[in-house]
Amino acid sequence: MKSWREHPRKTPATWSTPLLFQVVCGVFLAAMLVLGKMGLRDNDTAAEGHKVLTAAVVAAVVCVLVSVPFLVSRGRPALRGVGVGLATSAVIFLIGAAPYVYWLY
């Protein structure tokens, strides 16, 4: 029996989630840049909130769509772990963005 001092082996989903969260943030910033270039300007606070929420949803959808091939792969479990980490990071980012926009604007 293992003692409480022995750490369990970390799975790919565990160690990849903090790293993949940075990827989700990068996709969010790219979506904000594209929305700004497309003409969605933030002239007032309501427009800023809509821009942030739209970019957050776009980032989450893109990252979940990228993680789907990893999740359905039958090969290595590490790839599925990375897919779970990316999808989890996208959901956490979206859950954090909605209250932020509500509080800020």
Image (cartoon, rainbow, N blue to C red):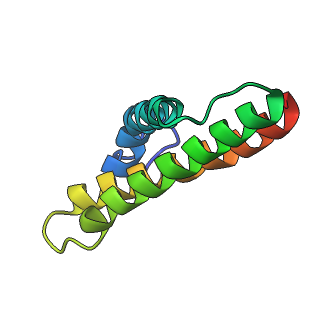
> What quarter of the picture does the N terminus occupy?
bottom left
Q: Residue at x 44, y 35 (%)?
A: 34
The residue lying furthest to the top in this view is 43
What number of labels is visible? 0
Residue 95 picture location, percent across and down: 68, 48
Q: Is residue 84 left or right of residue 80?
A: right
Which residue appears at 64% of the width and 38% of the height?
51
Residue 21 x %, y %: 45, 37
Q: Is residue 11 something one can see in this rendering? A: no
x and y percent of residue 84 in the render? 39, 58
Q: Nearer the viewer, residue 101 or 96?
A: 101
Residue in front for this viewpoint, 45 or 41: 41
Task: Residue at the far front: name it.
Answer: 39
Q: Does residue 102 show up?
A: yes
Residue at image coords 48%, 44%: 3
Front-most of 26 and 35? 35
Q: Position of residue 78 (x, y in %)?
A: 23, 55
**Quadrant in which the C terminus is drawn:** top right
| Whether residue 99 is situated above or below residue 77 in the rendered picture | above
Name the side, left or right, on which 11 lies relative to 25: left
Residue occupying the point 38% across, 35% down = 23
